Image: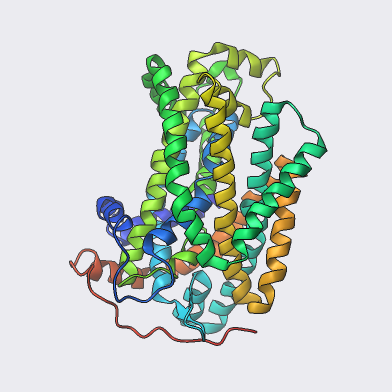
Amino acid sequence: MIVFLLGTHLIMTVRTGFIQRKIGTAIKLSVSKSDENAEGDVSQFGALATALAATIGTGNIVGVATGLWFGGPGAIFWMWIIGIFGIATKYAETYISVKYRVKDENGEMLGGAMYALERGFKNKAAGKVLAVLFAVFTFIASFGIGASVQSNALTGVITGYIQDGGIGVNAMLGVILVILVGIVIIGGIKSVTKVTEKLVPIMALLYAAGCIVIICLNYEYAGEAIMLIVTCAFTGQAAFGGTVGSGIALALQFGFKRGLFSNESGLGSAPLVAASATTKNPARQALVSMSGTFWDTVIICAITGIMLVSTMLANPSIQAGIAAGEITAAAQLTTTAFSSIPVLGPIVLTVGMILFSYSTILGWSAYGNRAVMYLFGNKGIRPYQLVFLLFVFWGCIGGGDLVWNISDITNALMAIPNCIAVLALGGVIAAGTKHYVYGGNLEEVDETPIPTIERKK
């Protein structure tokens, strides 16, 4: 799966003419006002914020620590690499999602890999089968990566501070979280987007500021941390006395696995909401979406990794704690690092964790919403939302290892039909990119009629 995903990233990097070099344009578009007189339901930034809400979560806080724990510092380097090349795949999957989007009878935009597979494939039967598979995998993944993983990580951080792992506290946190999630997702994607537009900038800046403060406190080790991350990626040398994972194979394995979890490029998740964006043409929204991978993996994960490694170098007691069995989980690395900031550190991490997990749950509820709409129509939305909330609660009281393993599996399953769509429609993506991006036609309005479909009642 790692080879398949990386191969897709490399192929789309070539087919899009190394679209990563347009990251400046992408960032500029992402903060500009939505395209006037264009079709869509949510703003370009709203779609990006929802995608970032779903990706800037435990993949950054706990996921990077997990990669470091099992794969060593080198895993962080490979997370960066898959993030850089994943920018091209995020662009490509969003392009086809917008290009092949449809409208329902009420004018609401619907898109994603399933519609690209249905409408873009010449072999309609194969396209339909792959479309259904993608929707089913997204439906399942939303309960794992979207609901349980986030609530499980949130509960772990909070109970870690109050030194209480009792089921009563976990259940209480679960009830509170279910209520806070329920009052937003009941309003659908527009409701989710309104919340994430306001939440994402605040939580990202808060967390990034905390990481930067810790790096400054460990400034003597920051350079060494970066060197260690790079050298361990290629030499396979043991790090921290062998108390955490080491070796090239482990660094690659956990770096790529956690990198996929972090930025979701290739999963086809972000395009599900991006297809609803108000945009003049597919390339504009594709550029906006790819900026999310840059912020998520290249920036947020980078400062998280440097923060963690520099903290471990500055505090040998952490290594001793791992060796003695006093530190037994990857999440404790992040907790220990933020504890180095007097008084405010634990507060920043706890608040950040709550916001990250909450926003990720909201984002993935929107993805699951689109999958359910494709599979079952309107009648499936309310039952789905109820089951989704049950999984949020279960994550608060359930086992973390099982949840993480399920997430890795469902991530891979989503990526298969989505990457097939991206690769099969690579010619369409390349031609459109050449015209809009490299031909200087980004302001051109795509006049192709958007078909209207009748949703299942």
Lateral position of residue 205 relative to residue 442, left or right: right
Q: How many marks?
A: 0
Residue 317 versus residue 78 in the image, above or below: above
Q: Nearer the viewer, residue 28 or 230?
A: 28
Q: Is residue 63 visible?
A: no
Residue at 44% x, 86% y is 451
Look at the image and name its color scheme: rainbow
- Provide residue 295's location: percent of width, then percent of height: 39, 45
Q: Examine the rendering and report whether any part of residue 453 can be seen.
A: yes
- Seen at 77% across and 32% down, the residue is 165
Instruction: State the image coordinates of residue 195 (x, y, percent, origin top left).
Output: 50, 56
Q: Position of residue 18 (x, y in %)?
A: 29, 54
Pick the front one: 429 or 223 = 223
- Tell me the residue at 68%/29% (across/down): 160
Q: Residue furthest left?
A: 440
Q: Is residue 115 above or below residue 313?
A: below
